[in-house]
């Protein structure tokens, strides 16, 4: 029986696109997630990309916040057909050296003509790299389910949302939001809580499709993230106390284990747009089909 690496080689089509996955979490933040039973963001993204790619995919992963990590520079960026950015618990306007490096890398991807896509942190990175601004959301933290995300006129006409309802819910977890769009950006979706729920940034002739929400999450991953952030969520009055938070988490886990539990789904107002992976990840498939595959150079 070949090992895992050999299996990947046997299953990968030589014409499959090659993607670079950027996971900006620090090592300590990744360990905190794993201690709560959550997956590393890069693993979630690689799995989602593999399921969404029609003819297979090759993925390299970099953790740029780790000591000694280095992002590709110059022409080496062109070795990739696309760059996918995971979410991250860091702050885009923190001034940390690794954050500044990631913003500059996004600029270089724009310059080198490599299309990008990502969740949450990704949309904020793209906007700042192109000259826009990000700040704390005055409405506070959006956590769990982002409700009634509504496509703008541009969103309804954009290939990012082919096959997506005009109004939908999505998994989410963020404190910051895009506050100023750069030149060349288009607002594609928003809701009452967060004005910019998705954005296309076109800069130096290259596009970055960014979502403020998380198509890579499922109910289990959302519960693990809530468990990890439970103390904070109680302080923010998401839950009356820790037992109430744990009871909510248990409900979500029960629904994940048995999606036929319509009693739980109805009580929590959970619809197909978060329960059905194929619907939840429409945007990922559209990015691969519309930007990555046409960009392939091999």
Image (tube, rainbow, N blue to C red):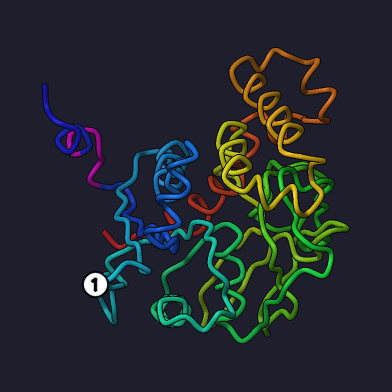
Q: Quadrant of the N terminus?
A: top left
Q: In this rendering, is residue 266 above or below 258?
A: below
Image side of residue 26 versus residue 135, left or right: left
Identify the residue at horizontal 57%, vertical 45% (top origin). 228
Q: Position of residue 92 (x, y in %)?
A: 57, 75
Task: Kindly give the residue lying farthest to the right in the view shown.
Answer: 192
Q: In this rendering, is residue 290 above or below 207?
A: above
Q: In this rendering, is residue 16 above or below 261?
A: below
Reply yes or no: does residue 11 show up in magenta.
Answer: yes
* Residue nearest the observer in this picture, 262 or 158: 262
Q: In this rendering, is residue 122 above or below 201?
A: above
Q: Position of residue 192 (x, y in %)?
A: 88, 58
The region drawn magenta spans: 9-14
Q: Position of residue 221 (x, y in %)?
A: 55, 37
**Residue 181 found in image quarter:** bottom right
Q: Quadrant of the C terminus?
A: bottom left
* Residue nearest the observer in this picture, 81 or 240: 240
- Disc 1 secondary structure class: loop
Residue of label 1: 68
């Amino acid at each position: 029986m070949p090992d895992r690496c050999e299996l990947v080689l046997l299953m990968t089509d030589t014409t499959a696109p090659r993607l670079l996955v950027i996971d900006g979490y620090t090592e300590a933040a990744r360990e905190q997630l794993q201690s709560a039973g959550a997956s590393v963001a890069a693993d979630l993204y690689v799995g989602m990309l593999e399921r969404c790619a029609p003819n297979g995919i090759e993925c390299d992963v970099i953790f740029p916040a780790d000591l000694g990590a280095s992002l590709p520079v110059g022409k080496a960026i062109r070795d990739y057909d696309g760059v996918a950015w995971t979410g991250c618990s860091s702050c885009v306007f923190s001034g940390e050296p690794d954050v500044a490096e990631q913003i500059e890398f996004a600029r270089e991807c724009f310059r080198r003509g490599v299309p990008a896509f990502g969740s949450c942190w990704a949309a904020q990175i793209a906007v700042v790299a192109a000259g826009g601004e990000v700040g704390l959301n005055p409405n506070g933290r959006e956590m769990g389910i982002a409700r009634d995300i509504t496509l703008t006129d541009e969103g309804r006409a954009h290939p990012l949302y082919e096959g997506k309802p005009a109004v939908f819910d999505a998994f989410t977890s963020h404190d910051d939001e895009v506050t100023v769009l750069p030149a060349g950006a288009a607002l594609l979706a928003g809701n009452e809580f967060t004005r910019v729920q998705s954005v296309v940034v076109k800069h130096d002739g290259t596009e970055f499709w960014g979502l403020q929400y998380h198509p890579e999450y499922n109910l289990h991953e959302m519960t693990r993230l809530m468990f990890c952030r439970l103390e904070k969520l109680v302080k923010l009055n998401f839950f009356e106390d820790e037992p109430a938070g744990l009871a909510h988490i248990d409900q979500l886990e029960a629904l994940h284990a048995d999606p036929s539990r319509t009693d739980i789904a109805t009580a929590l107002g959970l619809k197909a747009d978060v329960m059905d992976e194929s619907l939840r990840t429409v945007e990922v498939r559209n990015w691969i089909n519309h930007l990555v595959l046409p960009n392939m150079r091999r």
